[in-house]
Image (cartoon, rainbow, N blue to C red):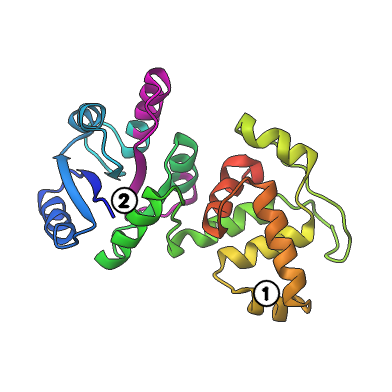
Amino acid sequence: MSEISIVLIEDHDLTRMGLKAALQTDSTVRVVGEAANATKGLKLLETAKPDVAVVDIGLPDMDGIELTRKFRQWQAETGDSTTKILILTMEHSEDAVLAAFAAGADSYYMKDTSIDRLTEAIQATYEGNSWIDPAIANVVLLQMRKALPEGQAAEKSKTVKIDALAPEYEQVLETYPLTQRELEILELIVAGCSNGQIAEKLYITVGTVKTHVRNILNKLCADDRTQAAVRALRSGLVA
């Protein structure tokens, strides 16, 4: 397996040095550049074109969300879409989480999680899967609940209309909206429940759960469960 090239954009020197030292002990990743502010970081991303950029949200000259937005614009203009963005932060407020994904971040990672998990998050992000830190799961769940009309009974098979943010999701979701049952299962997926646990909680068979999960992934154009939660945010299940 080839090494995953990494760029670190973090303004705290000790944090950046610690991350670099820890990541360099893993043979699967290679740090190819680092920057202490967004201006230098943006230029570094454009020249180094790493596989994954680990970007701190609280940069001094421009926050990581704005950097992500500007870099995505540059990628769209140049046709270079190889670099994935992993936001690194201590901030898990609703506004920060949603703004990061809306700006084009692929993954969201909390600084107080272990370095082993960071390597796992980088690997997942590199492979095209979106990593959602468990600490922000409640934000995802809250936004999905807001999408449910008041008074809608769980047993009814009514659907929830989704006003998508991205054209590639809008047509799919307008044609095949998520049912309330699918939203319930998506909520449990984000909470980390297995198919067996979901079946037990909803009093349905594992086979039925698998069918619903497959439908959810198809409707959200997602490759896996984690990516489905991010697509839920980006496609309009958020307010």
Residue 114 in sight in this render: no
What residue is shown at x 46% (from left), y 51% (from top)?
130
**Secondary element type, mark 1:** helix
Which residue is farthest right?
A: 156
* Percent position of residue 33, x then y: 15, 40
Which residue is farthest front?
A: 1
Residue 216 painted magenta: no
Quadrant, the C terminus: top right
Give neighbour class at mark 1: few <14, some 14-19, many 20+ (Cα, 10 Å).
Answer: many
What residue is shown at x 25% (from left), y 64% (from top)?
115
Q: In front here: 192 or 50? A: 50
Amino acid at the residue labelled 1:
Ile
Single out the mark in the foreground, 1 or 2: 1
The residues colored magenta run 68-95
* Percent position of residue 9, x then y: 22, 42
Q: Residue 154 falls in which quadrant of the image? A: bottom right
First in residue order: circle 1 vs circle 2:
2
Q: Residue 121 falls in which quadrant of the image? A: bottom left
Q: In front here: 80 or 167? A: 80
Q: Is residue 11 above or below residue 213?
A: above
Q: Mark 2 and mark 1 in contact (Cβ < 8 Å)?
A: no
In the image: residue 134, left or right of residue 28: right
What residue is shown at x 69% (from left), y 58% (from top)?
214
Provide the residue designation for mark 2: 88
Provide the residue designation for mark 1: 198
Residue 119 in sight in this render: yes
Q: Which mark is residue 117?
A: none
In the image: residue 13, left or right of residue 115: left
Amino acid at the residue labelled 2:
Leu
**Secondary element type, mark 2:** strand
What residue is shown at x 54% (from left), y 61% (from top)?
138
Residue 78 painted magenta: yes
